[in-house]
Amino acid sequence: MGMFPEFGGWISQNTQQPKKSENVNSKPVRETKTHDERDETKEQLKLWRDANKKKQYNEPSPTVKVHTDHNIDSFSSLKMEFTLGLPPQAAYDVLTNQDNKTYSREINGRPLLKSISRKVTSERGIGHRPILEVDKELSWNFLFFSGTIPIRLNVLENPKELSVYNWKRRKGMDYMETFTVDYTVEPMYVDAERVCKHKKPKSREEYRKCSGGKGLIASKVKVDQTFRPSFPWNLPLLSSYFRRFTVETTKKVAEDFQTRAGDIRGF
């Protein structure tokens, strides 16, 4: 499983096997983690699994805010936040899906978002990090019609900062003039109010100290997405439908991430 292959055996015993992509063109980009980071994540996953046996953790629904500038060809910006009941490193692994497998609900017999391929290019981005090319298929359904839409992105991952930046490639997403998605993951100290009564922890070290190392750490995922449809989808009536479809789909993808997190916890 991405940055933490040692958890693969445990996860496979507690989750349904996903559908493998048809074409994986490269090995995932991995960065070496310190022993402390690996130990903390392994420890947290065990705490989550044990806590989930006593009481299931239910993530709240994603919150979404959308602003559209109709003076710039229906340019829209979407800001969304959602919670994953996993420690940040494991949550980041879910978001980046380095093993290129499909974890998604189905629509008319097709996964909502199907992983097709993921490959490392020779190009470099900020910090000399490799730029990846990621291909997916998005399912759609309207009245009696259904089909798939290609999603072809450049991806720049920053595991150290727990962030991922995605932007459309030049070819393959002609229906979008502009499309970018920026994910960032932040820790959430779930048990802070209960176990750290006198002081709100400002760091993992403070939280570990006041919780005796038994406090759960979840993840808050912040999404900053921009998009602008191409002609004819930017025409008034069509742009309204296109915007609603994009926003609803983005929220469904976040909900599928939450379902995947529940599977990892042993839901």
Image: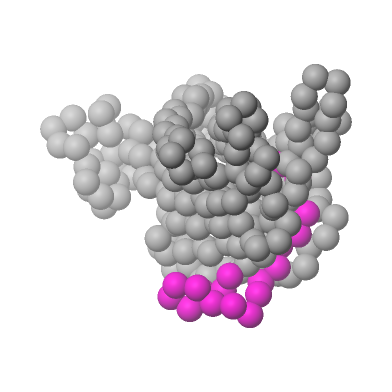
Point out residue 18 in the picture as x, y percentages from the top left corner: 77, 43
Q: Is residue 91 above or below residue 32?
A: above
Q: Nearer the viewer, residue 72 or 17?
A: 72
Q: Which residue lies at the image location 19% right of the left edge and 37% below the top edge?
A: 200
Left or right position of 39 against 205: right
Q: Indicate whether residue 16 is drawn in magenta.
A: no
Q: Nearer the viewer, residue 140 or 195?
A: 140
Number of callouts in the render? 0
Left or right position of 189 against 89: left
* Res 230 seen here: yes
Residues drawn in magenta: 113-131
Left or right position of 185 against 238: left
Q: Which residue lies at the image location 43% right of the left edge and 50% below the top edge?
A: 184
Q: Which residue lies at the image location 65% right of the left edge and 75% below the top edge?
A: 121
Left or right position of 8 against 32: right
Point out residue 110 in the picture as x, y percentages from the top left corner: 83, 35
Q: How is the image coloured?
A: one colour
Point out residue 78 in the picture as x, y percentages from the top left corner: 46, 38
Secondary structure that dominates the magenta span: strand
Q: Is residue 95 above or below residue 38?
A: above
User: Which quadrant does the C terminus fall into?
Assistant: top right
Q: Nearer the viewer, residue 121 or 233?
A: 233
* Res 35 seen here: no
